[in-house]
Image (cartoon, rainbow, N blue to C red):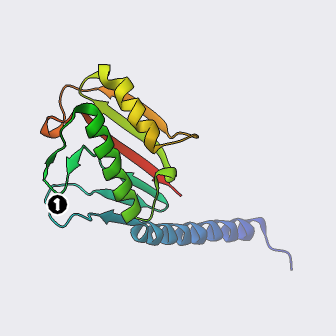
Amino acid sequence: MKQSPLAMTLLNVATVILLSSMTQAVAAQVTKQSVQFTNHSKANSLPFSEAVQVNNTLYLSGQIGFDSQTKQLVTGGVEAETKATLTNIKRTLNQTGYQLSDVVKCTVMLADINDFAKFNQIYQQFFSSPYPARSTFAVSGLALNAQIEIECIAAK
């Protein structure tokens, strides 16, 4: 039996509405289940998460060369701070099931852009080719008067 054009149009509209509703319901369910907020530091009372995972992408908060044992910024200048910062990033990645090789983007903030070469030398000890995309810029001040802060995005 052949259906009229009006019946076919109504059937198509109903199908689109049904599929749209199902897609929205599935998307809402996936979204709620796929976002995880992480704080491995039990003493972290700061108003941000250490990392947030959305599906297979991990967004790390900015990290500085903070020594969790002494609860202070490491001493030794930008080289020591860069090493401590990248060590902290590596630890956070590992605690969330990621590795440095999963990092796809880094944003680097330097208190003094003249420290770029010193920073870059340490950075290359942690990352290898193919390197993550990266932005580096100078800032007028960082938390705890740090010389460097780095935030990363990792993906699997």
Indicate the position of residue 147 as horizontal and vertical percent values: 22, 32
**Residue holding disc 1:** 44
Q: Residue furthest bottom?
A: 1
Residue at (45, 60) in percent of width and height: 98
**How many residues crowd mark 1 within 10 Å: few (<14), some (14–19), many (20+)?**
few
Q: Is residue 107 above or below residue 137?
A: below
Can you say which quadrant of the picture contains the N terminus? Answer: bottom right
Q: Between residues 137 and 101, which one lies in front from this camera angle?
A: 101
Taking depth in this image into account, of 10 and 127 the one nearest to the observer is 127
Residue 134: image quadrant is top left
Q: Name the residue type under label 1.
A: Asn
In the rendering, at what x and y percent does residue 85 appear?
A: 30, 45
Q: Position of residue 53 (x, y in %)?
A: 40, 60
Q: Is residue 62 visible?
A: no
Q: Quadrant of residue 12?
A: bottom right
* Residue 62 against residue 20 in the figure, above or below: above
Q: Locate residue 119, reporting x and y percent.
A: 35, 31
**Does residue 53 appear in this view?**
yes
Instruction: Please state which of residues 72 and 136 is positioned toward the viewer in this rendering.
Output: 72
Residue positioned most to the front? 76
Residue drawn at 57 percent across, 40 percent down: 129
